[in-house]
Amino acid sequence: MPSFDLRTSALRELNRALHALPPDTNETHWTIANPDGRHAIAVGLDAPVSVEIDGHVGYYCAGMNKRASVVVNGNAGVGVAENMISGFVHVRGDASQAAGATAHGGLLLIDGNAGARCGISMKGVDILVKGSIGHMSAFMAQAGTLTVLGDAGEALGDSLYEARLYVRGTVKSLGADCVEKEMRDEHRAELFARLKQAGLAGEVDPGEFRRYGSARSLYHFHVDNAGAY
Amino acid sequence: MCGIVGLFLKNPRLEPQLGALLATMLETMTDRGPDSAGFAIYGSPADMLKLTLRGPDSATLAAVVAALEAATGQAYGAEARDTHIVLSVPAAAEEAVRDWLCAHAPGIDVVSAGRRMEIYKEVGLPAAVARRFGLAGMAGSHGIGHTRMATESAVTTDGAHPFSTGPDECLVHNGSLSNHNDLRRRLRRAGLSFATQNDTEVAAGYLTWRMREGASLRQALESSLDDLDGFFTFVVGTETGFAVLRDPIACKPAVMAETGDYVAFGSEYRALVGLPGIAAATVFEPEPARVYVWERQ
């Protein structure tokens, strides 16, 4: 069980060691002490290992993650799990802006609040925030789900493509081309699966959520808008 | 880019350490602003008005102060720190001293005035700037620092933060304002004067003007959301207050930490790591367009 103290070991050394892991490694649980807000901790992982970070992390923690589980026992700075491909990233505190930006897959679980632009341009990731999210979240989101147990800030889902947004609390305002949609059985089932994945099955009622998605009116050029260009 | 740090002490027992804590925070933000650095420190209240002057070097400053003292027949208890010198001036004599400096000491700037606040700023790496002025040895109740990566105006000491446009008032800024020229014109008509073409100085002037008209620090910052256009994270100091405001889009980063002993601000959490008891502090990101104010009792 390798452990790194980032006050005594260089961050570059840690990331290099994580990148060198073969797929069948026996070193499957890593612990990191004193992250002290450093940027780019545990980025670019590509092995089925778990990494536990004890403290607050800076920007882009667990960025580009593939297959690994990364747990942050603290807050995360800008862009946690940005461009994640697969695996699991769990922030036990709050996350700053652009959490899960452009991520293609995997699960990003945030126990606290997420700042602005949560899930911006998300491409297939499942994001679940137990608290609230900031403004412009899911901007240009293309695929995946964003589930929020708290409230959403201004302009939720602006210029949205096909991602599905489930919000239990209030939404301050919807962005361009984002509309509330009917919650059908398939959506309740999908939401239940997401809640179950986050360990919330039976604790949170999918019936309390509203669903938001794209009105699909910005998909194609419309001749009536020609004057606007 | 730019980095901001701020520390507002609730527990007076930490006051002797204010400068040392702030110096560490400032140095950590070097990556965000290596061009120049500056800081404001609020020390114990003086009976006299503290005028902080800045000049090209300590010898020039000493000569100017000697000439000033000879011309006015008064001693001002000057305390020199590298390119800055702090004079203790009776409030009634402030105008006469400023007039004399204006007439006889071109190239000497009055950086700040106040009962408690002193401002120091210079071009260079933050650690070097802090060392030149002996920041680590300074005591006080609150302090604000800035590391600058210049974008809107040249790398000069004039462009370094904090900016002060009123007694015991200072402001540091990460971001850029787009309506500062128009606002500067309007504030000049209201009687304010500006030393630079810098956008941040206009924001400082705006708050000074609002507070002069009777607004509280909170009210002045709330109205700035309507009147300032651009990107900003502000940290503001007054004689007894400490405030934070981010623009509604929250373009520029901000992290805060609060304990029973202090409130601290950093552009990044890294800046707060050295503070006592930080592991148990409430760490949060200030919300966009929300004014945060702390006042000393």
Image (spheres, helix red, strand yellow):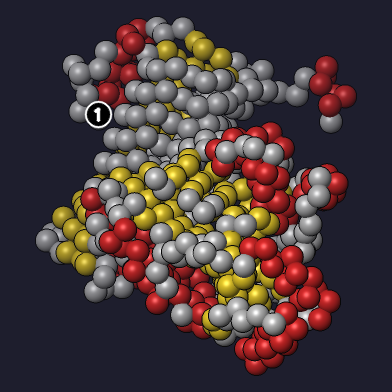
**Residue B202 position within the rendered picture, expressed as x and y whole percent measured from the top left:** 73, 52
> Toward the viewer: B284 or B39?
B39
At a point 42% along the width and 73% down the height, the residue shown is B138
Q: Is residue A1 left or right of residue B80?
A: left
Name the quadrant of the N terminus of chain B.
Answer: bottom right
Residue type of the residue flagged with mark 1? Gln
- Which of the 4 image quarters holds residue A159? top right
**Residue A12 position within the rendered picture, expressed as x and y whole percent measured from the top left:** 35, 70
Callout 1 secondary element: helix
**Residue B176 position within the rendered picture, expressed as x and y whole percent measured from the top left:** 68, 52
Q: Is residue A131 left or right of residue B277?
A: right
At a point 84% along the width and 26% down the height, the residue shown is A228
Looking at the image, can residue A72 be seen?
no
Q: Is residue A4 left or right of residue B150?
A: left
Q: Which residue is mark 1?
A: A197
Chain at tag 1:
A
Looking at the image, can residue A184 be seen?
yes
